[in-house]
Amino acid sequence: MGAKGYVGFIYVIYDKVMHRAYLGKKSYQSTLKGKKIESDWRNYKSSSDYVTTMLAGRPAEEFQWICLEQYKTKGTLAWAETYSLCFVKAPTTKWWYNKRIEGISWKVSEEITSRHLERLSNITDMLRKQNA
C-alpha cells in the first residue's frame, strides 16, 4: 500500500463481535499550508466519530481492517467509495455503520423499490445489448 502513483484506498473495518462493517476512503496525501505531505494513512482509524469512539473503547482484536483497492485519481477514489456504499445499500441496512454517502447527509428512511431496481436493470440490460 502507498505505492507511487496511487492517491488513496477504499477500506472496510469489520466488527467481528457485532458482525457489522464500516466502509470508507483514505488519501495518501493531505495539504498543509499549500504543500502536499503524507497523510496519517498508516495509523488512520476512521472519519466516523461513532466508529472512532467504538475503536477506542474496544480491543483491536475485535476488528479486521481490509483494503478493498487503491486508486490513482481522486475522482475514481470518491466514485469507488460512493459506488461501494450504494452497492451494499449501506444507509438502509443494519449491517453497515455508514449512514452518509460522500458527505451528503440526507435521511434515508426507505429502501429503493423493487420496481425501481427492475426498471433500472432493464435499462442497463438494454444499453449493454445496444453497445455490445
Image: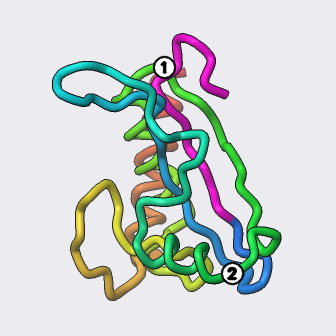
Task: Pick whichever, 46 or 87, lies toward us.
Answer: 46
Q: Position of residue 72 (x, y in %)?
A: 48, 20
> SS of the residue at dot 2?
loop
- Which label belongs to residue 72? 1
Say left or right for 61 vs 50: right
Q: Position of residue 6 (x, y in %)?
A: 52, 20
| Placement of 36 over or under 110, stated as above or below | above
| Spatial separation of the CA atoms under disc 1 and disc 2 | 34 Å
- Residue at the (46%, 44%) spot, across then down: 124
Say which amino acid is labelled 2. Answer: Arg
Residue 88: quarter of image? bottom right
- Which label belongs to residue 24? none
Q: Residues within 10 Å of mark 2 (few under 14, many from 20)?
A: few
Q: Residues within 10 Å of mark 1 (few under 14, many from 20)?
A: some
- Which label belongs to residue 58? 2
| Placement of 76 over or under 65, stated as above or below | above
Residue 62: quarter of image? bottom right
Say left or right for 43 vs 25: right
